[in-house]
Image: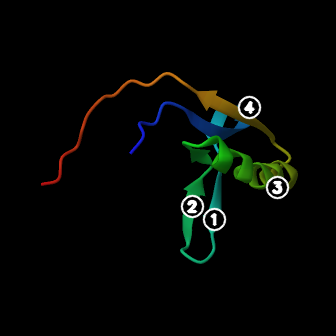
Amino acid sequence: MKKVDKVWAYFALEEEGEGLCAFLDQKQKIWIPLICATETVAKRFEDMAQNIANESGTKIQFAEFTVRTDIKIIEPE
């Protein structure tokens, strides 16, 4: 498996600061954040980010992160 060296995410730009955008998966009833490790998936999220902007009236920032700091490996117990 390839090591993740970039992450893309969509953030809502609010007066209080930034918030990670997410959408509700109606089938599973869980929130899925608009963050991913491939540019292909990031581009698929763009329509969802546009819908969030349209429905909330909030600007959405698309960002790429390229600095990685490994903090901990959690082993199975």
The earlier-in-sequence mark between 2 and 3 is: 2
The earlier-in-sequence mark between 3 and 1 is: 1
Label total for image: 4
Residue nearer the viewer, 1 or 15: 1
In this rendering, the label closer to the viewer, 4 or 3? 3
Neighbor class of circle 2 (other Cα within 10 Å; few <14, some 14-19, many 20+) is few
CA distance separating discs 4 and 3: 20 Å
Is 23 left, or right, of 30 in this rendering? Answer: right
Q: Where 51 falls versus 25 (above or below)?
A: above
The quarter of the picture where the C terminus appears is: bottom left
Local secondary structure at mark 3:
helix
Residue 75 percent location from the top left of the image? 18, 46
> Which residue, given by chain and number where applicable, does mark 4 sit on?
15
Residue at the image position 73 percent from the left and 46 percent from the top: 43
CA distance separating discs 3 and 1: 12 Å
Local secondary structure at mark 4:
loop
Local secondary structure at mark 2:
strand
The earlier-in-sequence mark between 1 and 4 is: 4
> Which residue, given by chain and number where applicable, does mark 3 sit on?
51
Residue at the image position 38 percent from the left and 45 percent from the top: 1
Q: Amino acid at mark 1?
A: Leu
User: For residue 74, which quarter of the picture?
Assistant: top left
Q: Amino acid at mark 2?
A: Trp
